[in-house]
Amino acid sequence: MILRNKSFLLLMVGELVGGVGLWLSIIGNLQFMKHLLSSDFLKSLILMTGLLASVIFLPLIGKWIDSTNKKTVLLTANVVRCSSPLFMFPALMYDSIPWMIAALVLMQISSAAYFPSVRTTIPLLIEKDQLLSANTIHMNVTTISRIAGTAIAGVMVAQLDLMTIYVSSFIVYVVLFGMNCLIRIPKHSEDPVVKTSSQKEKMRFSEVFTLIKAERAVLVGLVAAGMLNIFFGGFNLLILSFSKVQQSDAIMGLVYTVEGVSILIAGFLVKRVIGKTNLVWVSSLLLFVFAISQFFMTFAGSAISVLTGFAIFGSAIAFFFPMVTTVFQRQIPNQMQGRFFSFKEMVDRVLMQVSLLATGACLDLFGTSWYMYIVMSLTIVVGLFTTYQSKKYKLDVRQNEPNAARKVAEGSATVAG
C-alpha cells in the first residue's frame, strides 16, 4: 500500500513543503524587483538568468544523479536551496540586483537537481505496478503546493516585509531538509552507484539520445509532453489576456481555481479509469481532449466557455502527466533515469521560455481567439503524429506488466557506453 510507505509519504510531504517555500521566494523576488525596476523586459531578463544557468548545468546534474546515491542528491540540492534565501539578505540591505540574481541562480540550480531526483527516487521506493498511482499522488501534491504556495505567499507579501518572507522561506527549506534526512531507500532497490573513475568517464550524457532513439514509446511521450509545455509556457499571459478580453479580474482567480480543482478531482479517478490500458495509446488520445478544451477557449469573451475549457484541460492533465511519467520510469533503466529526467527538465525549460516569447507575440499579432485556434491546430497535429507512431510501432506500455522493450533500451545504452 503506497500510503503506508513512510519514505514515499515523506518525499510527498517534502514536495508540498518545498513548493510553499519556492512560491514564497518567487513572489518575494517579484515584489523586490517591483520597487527597483520599472521595465518588465528587464525583469524578464533577470528571471531568465536563473533558468539559463540551470539549463547549462543540467547535463552535469543528470550524470551526477546517475552516479550518486539519490538521497545524497536530494540533501545536497536542499542545502543549495537553503542558501538561496540567505543571499537575499544583503540584496535587501543594499537594494542590490546582483545579489538577487545570485539567489535566483542558486534556487534554479537546486530545483534543476531536486525535481529530476524526485522522479528517479519514486521507482526505488514503489513497486512497478504502483507507479501510476504514485505519479498521480505526486501530481496532486504539486498542484496543492502550487495553490497553497501562491495563496500563502500572496497574503504574506501583503501583510509582512520582505525580510520576514525570506526568513520564512529559509525555515521552510530547513524543514524540507530534515524530512529528506528521514527518507530510507531500501537496499535491494537502490540503483547501482558508480564507484570507479573509469566507469564515471564512460558515463556520458549523450547516451540519453541513443536510448530515446531506440525506445519509441519514450520519444512519443516526449513529443506529447513537449506540446503541452509549449502551451504552459504562455499560460499566465493567456489567462491575463482572457481577463482583458472579458474586462474582468475575477476570471483570473476562477481559471486557476477551476483548473486546480479539476486536476485534484480527476486525480482520484486515474487508476480506476486507466486500469490495465495501454498508457502510450491513451496518452496520445488525450491530446485530442486537450484540443477540445482549447476549442472552448477560442470563445475568449465567454467566461462559461473559458472555464469549461480549463475544467476539461485540468481533468485531462490529471491523467496525462502521471501516465507519461510512468512510461518514462518503466522504459528507462534506473541507471539512466537521472540523465533522462535532467534532459527532459532542460527541454521543458527551454520550450517554456521560447513559448513565453511566442505567446506574447501571437497574442499581440492575432488576438486571443486566433491564438487558441493556432494552439488547437498544433495540438491536433501532434496528436495525429503520436497516435500514428503508437499504431505503426505497436507501442504498448502498461502500468503492471513487464515490457521487453526496456531490455532492448538497456542493451542499446550499454553498447553506446
Image (spheres, rainbow, N blue to C red):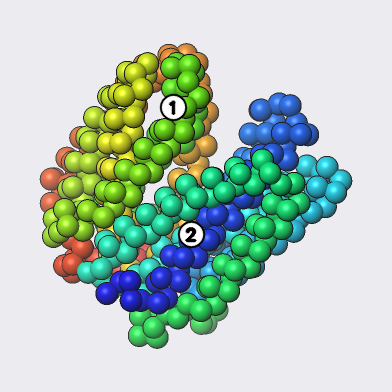
Q: Are marks 1 and 2 in contact (CB under 8 Å)?
A: no
Residue 403, relative to residue 153: is it above or below? below
- Where in the figure is residue 253, as x and y percent of width and height? 46, 33
Q: Secondary structure at mark 1?
A: helix
- Where in the figure is residue 195, as x and y percent of width and height? 51, 82
- Confirm whether residue 190 shows in the render: yes
Give left or right: position of 156 versus 134.
right
Q: Secondary structure at mark 2?
A: helix
User: Most extreme residue toward the front, as rendered?
Assistant: 159
Mark 1 or mark 2, earlier in chain: 2
Q: Quadrant of the C terminus?
A: bottom left
Neighbor class of circle 1 (other Cα within 10 Å; few <14, some 14-19, many 20+) is many
- Where in the figure is residue 346, as x and y percent of width and height? 49, 49
Neighbor class of circle 2 (other Cα within 10 Å; few <14, some 14-19, many 20+) is many
Q: Residue at x 42, y 50 (%)?
A: 143
- Confirm whether residue 412 shows in the render: no
Q: Report the disc number at residue 16.
A: 2
- In space, the residues marked 1 and 2 are separated at their CA atoms by 26 Å
Q: Residue at x 56, y 67 (%)?
A: 176
Q: Report the disc number at residue 410.
A: none
Q: Residue at x 74, y 26 (%)?
A: 38
Give left or right: position of 23 versus 368.
right
Q: Residue at x 38, y 43 (%)?
A: 260
- Where in the figure is residue 413, as x and y percent of width and height? 35, 66
Q: Amino acid at mark 1?
A: Ile
Of discs 1 and 2, which sits in the foreground?
A: 1
